[in-house]
Structures are given as C-alpha cells and as structure tokens.
Image (cartoon, rainbow, N blue to C red):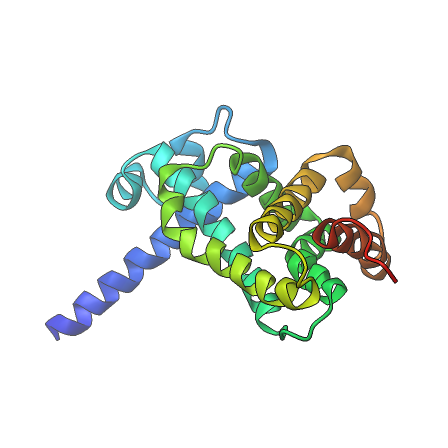
Amino acid sequence: MATGKTDLRRAAGQRTRDGLLRATLELLASRGPEGLSLREITVRAGANVAAVSYHFGSLKGLCDSAVESALESYLDAQLEALGQLSEGSTVEELAAAFGRPMMQALTAGGTELAVIRTVARVGIDPPDGWERLIAKFQQTRTDALRVLMTSLPEVGEEELIFRVRCSAGLLNWLVLAPLGAELAAQPAERLEQLLVPVLAGALRGRSQPA
C-alpha cells in the first residue's frame, strides 16, 4: 500500500513538473522572458509557487529547464532523421535530414515555430544546464560526418565539422530573421525545394569538378 501511494505521489509530481515546463515554454514562445512572472506561470499550469521552488529552485531555473527541454526534443528529432542515413547517402539527403526538424517547425507555425525561435534565441548564450546535451550535439555531428567523409573524401574532418556548425547556425538564423516568416508561408514541399539546396551547398563547400 505504501509503495502504491509513493508511486501516485511521484506521478503527481511529474505531472506538476511537466505542466510547469509546458506553461513556461508557451509563455516564453509567445512573448519572450521579459516580465514573465511565477504567478503567471503557476496560474497557467494549475500549480503553486512552492512547486516551482521544489522542482526547479527558481524562476530562472524553470525557464532554463523549459528551453533545455525544447532543445532536447529538437535534437532528438534531428538525430532520428540523421539516423536513417547511411554512408552512401548523398549530401542533399543529409541536408534534408539535418534541416527536417526546423522545416517542420516552419511549416507547422504557431507555438511549435515560436518554441524553435525561443531555442534559437537562447542558444546564442546557452545556460550551464545545456552541458548535459553535449553528447547529443556531438552525435548529430558524428552522423553528419559519416555521410560527408564518404561524399567528400578530399575535404579534411576539421573543415567538414566547420561546415556542419555553419549549417546549424544558418538554420537558427533563418527562424529568427524576417526571411523565416516568408519561408513559413511556403508549402512544405516548396520549403524543402528552397532550403535543401542551400544547406547542401553549405555542407559541400566550393563547387566540385564534374
């Protein structure tokens, strides 16, 4: 009986934690961190201020955790797409997989796009907690290099890593720049037609001889 009650309390605590994260991310996505208050978050989440202190320590801890959670979801989606590639995949296929989560957010619009914009904005000066995601960042790079080193054997690994990092920066810039709003208005198929060649060009670098 005691174990059952403990499990129920743990489940209730997890629901409260998830609700606070969701409410915080929605508010951050809709208008940024300026003026965000604990009361506003807790009312939306149906929780109390003590729950924020218990699960996250402070408002800053809650905001950092919310954005970190969104970034982790983005990285997981990117890793899933990259994981379907093989060493024989083309640079264009790599570009499509690498950019797919961002393109899906642009196509979906609304809260999903706002969340991605929040992640990109905060990523300029990431909080300390993001260190636990380093392994996932490194895995996306490894998966991309697996394709690039086969497709572009004449290019050194250090330069290929630089190109992957530039491509990631390009995606972040797109969702924050006015051009991102124009792309978001495009149908999914047209968006891919526009964006994949640009990403592929960044990954491929200078034109290769025919």
- In percent of the image, x 50 and y 30: which residue is there? 33
Badge count: 0
Q: Is residue 46 visible?
A: no
Q: Residue furthest left?
A: 2
Q: Is residue 52 visible?
A: yes
Please tell me which residue lies in front, 168 or 203.
Answer: 203
- In percent of the image, x 54 and y 57: which residue is there? 141
**Is 119 placed left or right of 69 in the picture?**
right
Please tell me which residue lies in front, 69 or 38.
Answer: 69
**Is 195 placed left or right of 80 in the picture?**
right
- In x, y percent, where is residue 164? 62, 51
**Is 56 placed left or right of 28 in the picture?**
left
Please tell me which residue lies in front, 13 or 114.
Answer: 114
Q: Quadrant of residue 5?
A: bottom left
- Viewport quadrant of the N terminus: bottom left
166 over 87 or under it: above or below? above
- In x, y percent, where is residue 153? 66, 63
- In x, y percent, where is residue 126? 45, 37
- In percent of the image, x 37 and y 40: which residue is there? 62
- In percent of the image, x 80 and y 58: which residue is there? 192
122 over 15 or under it: above or below? above
- In x, y percent, where is residue 68? 44, 46
- Viewport quadrant of the C terminus: bottom right
